[in-house]
Amino acid sequence: MIRFLIKGLIRDRSRSLFPVLTVMVGVMLTVVLQTWFRGVESEGVQIAARFDTGHVKIMSQAYAEEYDQIPNDLAFIGVSDLMQNLRRDFPDMIWLPRIKFGGLLDIPDENGETRAQSPVIGFAVDLLSPDSLERDILNLDHAVIRGRLPEKPGEIVLSDEMARQLGVQINETATLIGSTMYGSLATYNFTVVGTIRFGITVMDRGSMIADLSDIQMALDMDDAAGEILGLFPDLFFYSRRADSIKNRFNAEYEKPEDEFSPIMVTLREQAGFGEILDLVGSVVNIAIGIFVVVMSIVLWNAGLIGSIRRYGEIGVRLAIGEYKNHLYRSMIIESLCIGFFGTLLGTTLGITIAFYLQETGINISSMMKNASIVMSDVMRARITPGSFVIGFVPGLLATFLGTSISGIGIYKRQTSRLMKELEV
């Protein structure tokens, strides 16, 4: 019977084309919205993890207590040995030692006198090691605007906006003025070999990237680092796995009596990210739920209207002797077929659009000019396993309910009045 009903739907476009298109559009919008919200949510987490928090982060206990002040005088010493242990004990993670620092960047003129100055936020990462993944993690190769990335010691790159404001040219000297790990004044000359733009407004205003070994030398931090970031290889955050790794590490290395012993924290335990992620997740789920309900109501009404339009057809079929139960079942099966095919088409189209938004994204830089939070200027969608099934909720359930409710009218039709209705 199902095969017979499908043939009837294909041949009679008045019964199938509009309902299928309605379901397809509704499901497509549902899928695109779900992937967009998930993309915005995961994009914020990825940016924070790659540039600041990691999925897990190792610091000294004293550094962790004053983390917001970037207290490099409390940095962890003995990074090389700890890195070897981490790569041995947790080989499925990416481990990245880093130093964050602040200071004053001085640009001298041809006479060595100060020509321009600006406060700067610096990031020391491993740029020169052959097996370093920092260029890929920070997407540095694609961020270069002028010049190139550092290839030898003593070279740095600046944010393009700050470099233009200071009038810095490629291969000019820049002097970093800051404080060492032990609190004394530090001055160190670098060569500016390039400028970059991250697409993250707050970082593009005034930041510099230098090799880790250069900053260790400049700030007297031999074999030391403020932070060691741990990332999952696909760069997506998995809360349970992160908690498991943290518990294993702290059970072995944490020593409450030694404030300089290493301690590991997860992304959720830093800067209120746990509350933020819970809030964002709740908002996203509520928004998706509301939209699914709205689309379900729309498709439900479409099913009701479709059944009402077939009032005369139902009367004819009853008049020629078709049983009410059989007619009711056939209408429900027809609605499920329409919902299924419409959902398949809508999901396919929605995933296609979502894939484009995932790869290309939408540039919102014009809205981020005064942003003070770390957020990408390009918003992208994210396709998840749920994206392939969420469309079946409005696509199948709503059409089924619409037809089921409207089809109850079949049992209210009186056979004795059918011929009179047909005469009219």
Image: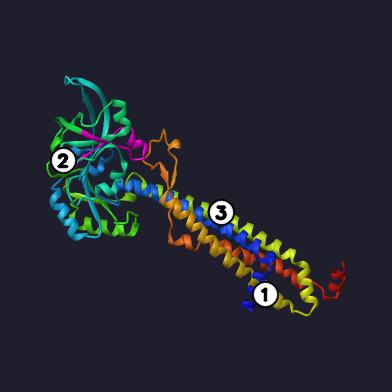
Compared to 76, does 236 lie above or below? below
Compared to 359, does 181 lie above or below? above
x 26%, y 41%: residue: 67
Depth check, mark 2 against mark 3: the one in front is 2
Q: Is residue 86 left or right of residue 14?
A: left
| Image: magenta residue range | 192-215
What separation in Å lies between label 2 and label 3 (alpha carbons)? 53 Å
Mark 2 residue element: loop
Q: Quadrant of residue 292?
A: bottom right
Label 2 sits on what residue type?
Lys
Of callouts 2 and 3, which one flags the residue occurring earlier in the amino acid sequence?
Answer: 2
Q: In the rendered image, is residue 19 in sight?
A: yes
Q: Which residue is mark 3?
A: 291
Q: Are marks 2 and 3 in contact (CB under 8 Å)?
A: no
Q: Which residue is mark 2?
A: 152
x 54%, y 65%: residue: 344
- The one nearer the camera, 15 or 39, is 15
